[in-house]
């Protein structure tokens, strides 16, 4: 995975610290062009991986990306599913049958037959596979080397002790989409133990990792010990603790943790993307990467090679 990943919270009015800022972002990104401008800026700065939810708006963004294969040749997308609000809103606006028609792939009747049988038999794995097929429909034709299970479902399955479903997600993503499975969680230490118990080796886990322990279930010390164990591939998110930390302080802490493979951040301006990129790479000089050796001089024209 790339060292730096661009997230999508800023596009869809998600801000864990300020509702006012979230509203401002919602107004700014009403048009698809505003989102694409940020993606273009990130690509021009050498950041080629976009980690995003399966929000309805992403369907149009993916369609535009497909229509411009030369421009977005280097772009990789990491889908994160499911986006629960999408289905709740669809039922409210379209009704139950209308929502099924909107999202069910392969025809309403065949999907209902498959999903109905799964429900009657309490076949959670079949229902999960159905959900994945629905969510991945918008990403057809795009490069999706890693597909993440959102924490809303990961942690629910974790709490219910349904490790077989977590394992089935891993297997289905590999067999159906020829990609790697990733898991987003608010309880990194516990999830890692369960995934290892399910015989999933070296899993990709995205979790809150920050200096003040924001949304780190079990505490910062336990997270640091788990990361240092080298048993998985960590992706750090919420590194700024929803704005409670200054960027330099936040990135300095995350980059000091051995073994963190990727750092996810959100930014809405070219300057903020550049500043975040530069700080991460400046502080990652000891990072174990074949194109990022200790002592390498930090220079502008090296950034794209390092990130790709």
Image (cartoon, helix red, strand yellow):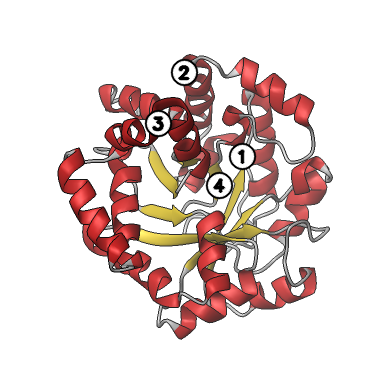
Q: Secondary structure at mark 2?
A: helix
Residue named by callout 4: 4
Q: Which residue is mark 3?
A: 95
The mark that comes first in sequence, 1 or 4, is 4
Answer whether labels 1 and 2 touch (C-beta < 8 Å): no
**Alpha carbons under labels 1 and 4: distance apart:** 17 Å
Q: Nearer the viewer, residue 197 or 82?
A: 82
How far is disc 1 from disc 2 in space, using C-alphas? 33 Å
Q: Nearer the viewer, mark 1 or mark 2?
A: 2
Question: What percent of the width, then of the height, locates residue 213?
Answer: 79, 61
Assess disc 2: are there few (<14), some (14-19) or many (≥20) residues with their C-alpha within 10 Å of its C-alpha: some
In the rendered structure, which disc, 2 or 4, sits on the residue that comes first in sequence? 4
Against 109, is 218 above or below? below
| Residue 210 can be seen in this image | yes
| Residue that carries the numbered disc 2 in the rendered image | 32
**Pointer 1 residue:** 299
Q: State how far apart marks 2 and 3 are (Cα).
A: 26 Å
Q: At 31% across and 68% down in the image, what residue appears? A: 123
Residue at the image position 49 percent from the left and 32 percent from the top: 89
| Residue 271 placement (x, y as % from top left) | 67, 25
Which is more toward the observer, 59 or 105? 105
Camera-side residue of 165 and 289: 165
At 71% across and 51% down in the image, what residue appears? 239
Q: Quadrant of residue 254?
A: bottom right
């Amino acid at each position: 995975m790339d060292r730096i990943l661009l997230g999508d919270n800023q596009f869809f009015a998600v801000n864990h610290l300020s509702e006012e800022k979230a509203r401002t972002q919602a107004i700014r990104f009403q048009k698809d062009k505003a989102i694409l401008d940020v993606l273009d800026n990130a690509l021009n700065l050498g950041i080629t991986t976009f980690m995003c939810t399966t929000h309805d708006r992403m369907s149009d963004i993916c369609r535009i990306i497909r229509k411009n294969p030369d421009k977005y040749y280097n772009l990789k997308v990491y889908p994160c599913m499911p986006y629960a609000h999408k289905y709740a809103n669809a039922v409210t606006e379209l009704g139950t049958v209308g929502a099924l028609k909107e999202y069910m792939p392969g025809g309403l009747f065949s999907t209902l037959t498959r999903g109905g049988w799964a429900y009657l038999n309490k076949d959670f794995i079949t229902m999960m596979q159905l959900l994945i097929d629905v969510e991945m429909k918008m990403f057809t034709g795009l490069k999706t080397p890693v597909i993440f299970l959102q924490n809303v479902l990961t942690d629910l399955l974790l709490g219910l002790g349904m490790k077989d479903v977590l394992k089935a997600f891993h297997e289905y993503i590999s067999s159906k989409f020829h990609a790697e499975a990733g898991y987003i969680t608010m309880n990194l230490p516990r999830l890692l133990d369960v995934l290892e118990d399910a015989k999933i080796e070296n899993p990709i886990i995205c979790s809150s990792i920050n200096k003040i322990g924001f949304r780190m279930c079990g505490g910062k010390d336990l997270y640091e010990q788990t990361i240092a164990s080298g048993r998985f591939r960590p992706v750090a998110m919420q590194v700024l603790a929803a704005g409670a930390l200054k960027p330099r302080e936040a990135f300095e802490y995350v980059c000091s943790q051995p073994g963190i493979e990727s750092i996810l951040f959100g930014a809405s301006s070219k300057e903020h993307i550049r500043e975040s990129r530069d700080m991460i790479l400046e502080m990652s000089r000891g990072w174990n990467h074949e194109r990022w050796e200790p002592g390498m001089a930090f220079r502008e024209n090296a950034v794209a090679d390092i990130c790709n």
